[in-house]
Image (cartoon, helix red, strand yellow):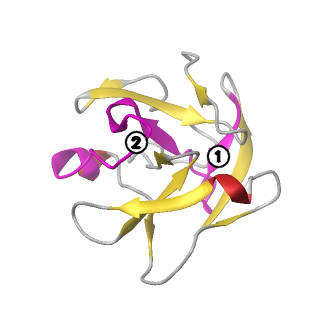
Amino acid sequence: MTIATRAVPSVGTILVNSQGHALYIFEPDNHSKVTCVGTCASAWPPVKLAAAAKAAGAAGVKASLLGSDPDPSGGRVVTYAGWPLYTYVADSSPGSASGQALNLNGGLWYVISPSGTVIKTKP
């Protein structure tokens, strides 16, 4: 799994997956562990790692901020600056961030910058 960066209108430069889709943090994860499971994970799929794989960062991504945490449903989830990362099923095209600042599935969702800062700007 390669994490990259992309400029997205109204939120700035953010982390994206290898398909260019925005990566989100879930505020209830509290910068520590995966809490979006079950129905929540159906709408906000966690960025999973294959067995024994490690996340890699493209240009602009700080390798020192990449990591992984156990996923309660099995496997491991990529983290950045301690935050588990998720995609959003409603982001149908690369470069969109329609999940930004949404309050869904029990909490707020935000994109994250390459510096590891959570971006709370509403689009």
Q: How many residues crowd around disc 2 within 10 Å: few (fewer than 14), some, or many (20 or more)?
A: few
Q: Residue at x 38, y 48 (%)?
A: 89
Residue 21: percent from left, percent from top: 57, 50
According to the picture, the residue beneath numbered tag 1 turns out to be 15
Residue 113 spot, x, y in % from top left = 67, 36
Type of amino acid at the residue the image marks with label 2: Ala
**Depth check, front residue: 96 or 41:** 41
**Does the magenta run of residues contain 24?**
yes
Crowding around mark 1 (Cα neighbors within 10 Å: few <14, some 14 to 19, many 20+) is: many
Whether residues under marks 2 and 1 lie with C-beta atoms below 8 angstroms apart, the answer is no
Residue range highlighted in magenta: 12-41
Across and down, in percent, residue 90 comes to 40, 42
Asked whether residue 97 is in view, the answer is no
Image coordinates for residue 30, horizontal then vertical, percent: 38, 34
Residue displayed at 30% across by 26% down: 107
Determine whether 32 is above or below 105 in the image.
Answer: below
Residue at 27 percent across and 51 percent down: it is: 41
Q: Amino acid at mark 1?
A: Leu
- In the image, what residue occupies the spot 61% across and 57% down? 66
83 or 58: nearer the eye? 83
Residue sitting nearer the eye, 19 or 4: 4
| Circle 2 residue | 90
